Image (tube, helix red, strand yellow):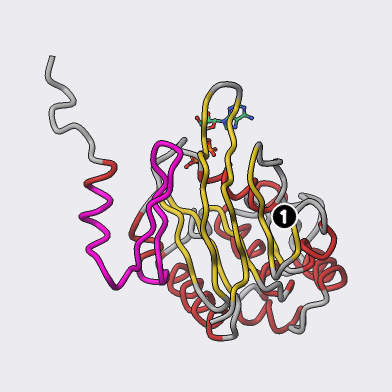
């Protein structure tokens, strides 16, 4: 396997609140990694630090040897990250958004192909502003596909999807992996990533604990780390 992403000693805090403390991890080409933690733990903050939307207080991030700050242009060419589907340009339609991403990233797939794969024929000319959440999620995934980038970072990609769409997305992710792409996806739910991910990183108290999905009972580990107090309503 070849090394794609290398994160070394990454730390980040908002004011005095440490969110990420001295995190180090790598992602190999052709792997899917889940980032799992309850709401408000720091998943989005980690993705923003990895991509350089936020500047780490300490540490480095490099993608195919390109440093996220000192070699930013090359670094950005190899990844795709759009935080969530509420950040899509509301006035554009999927055709226009896909065409834009294809022009900038230079991916191999055609707009027609992506529309077909994601079953978006009926709304390829509909403006994002009048789409449902699930439709927007399809547009978002389409942009990732058409970018052809080596590293795809998704914040909660399965949000708002019906079971058929979840199955479709899962298949698409596993085909991307088969093509040597790597995916880092966050989720506050274990179930969403366990079927796809090769490994899972749990974020707790600003630190990561990483496990190979085949090696342990992830649900048991999740419960151990994030258990809810059984006696919530006792006075
Ligand atoms: N701009 C900000 N300024 C100050 N604190 C922030 C800011 N953005 C996030 N935080 C805090 O950082 C912590 C981590 O937030 P983050 O959005 O990274 O969590 P998350 O795990 O992605 O949560 P969710 O699953 O709810 O999306 C939270 O306590 C949040 O309140």
Answer with left or right where residue 232 lies relative to residue 24. left
State the image coordinates of residue 206 (x, y, percent, origin top left): 46, 38
Given residues 92 and 28, the one toward you in this image is 28
Answer with left or right where residue 137 lies relative to residue 35. right
Q: Is residue 202 magenta?
A: yes
State the image coordinates of residue 144 (x, y, percent, origin top left): 67, 68
Location of residue 147 by image quarter: bottom right
State which region is magenta. 195-223
Residue reaching furthest top?
235
- Label 1's element? helix
Taking the image in four quarters, ligand 1 sits in the one at: top right
Residue at 57% x, 52% y is 133
Residue at the disc numbered 1? 128
In the displayed structure, would residue 228 be above or below residue 7?
Answer: above
Residue at 50% x, 74% y is 31
Given residues 1 and 110, the one toward you in this image is 1
Answer with left or right where residue 16 lies relative to residue 81. left
């Amino acid at each position: 396997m070849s090394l794609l992403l290398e994160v070394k000693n990454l730390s980040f805090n908002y004011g005095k609140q440490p969110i990420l403390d001295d995190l180090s991890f790598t992602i190999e080409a052709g792997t899917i990694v889940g980032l799992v933690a309850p709401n408000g733990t720091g998943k989005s903050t980690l993705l923003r630090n990895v991509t350089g939307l936020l500047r780490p207080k300490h540490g480095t991030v490099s993608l195919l040897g390109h440093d996220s700050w000192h070699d930013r242009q090359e670094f950005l060419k190899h990844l795709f990250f759009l935080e969530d589907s509420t950040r899509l340009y509301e006035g554009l339609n999927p055709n226009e958004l896909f065409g834009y991403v294809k022009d900038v990233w230079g991916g191999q797939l055609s707009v027609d192909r992506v529309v077909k794969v994601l079953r978006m024929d009926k709304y390829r000319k509909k403006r994002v502003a009048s789409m449902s959440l699930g439709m927007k999620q399809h547009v978002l995934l389409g942009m990732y596909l058409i970018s052809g980038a080596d590293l795809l970072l998704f914040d909660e990609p399965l949000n708002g999807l019906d079971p058929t769409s979840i199955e479709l997305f899962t298949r698409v992710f596993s085909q991307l992996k088969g093509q040597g792409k790597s995916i880092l996806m966050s989720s506050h739910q274990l179930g969403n990533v366990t079927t796809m991910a090769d490994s899972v990183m749990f974020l707790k108290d600003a630190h990561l604990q990483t496990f190979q999905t085949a090696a342990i009972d992830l649900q048991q580990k999740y419960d151990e780390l994030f258990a809810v107090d059984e006696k919530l309503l006792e006075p």
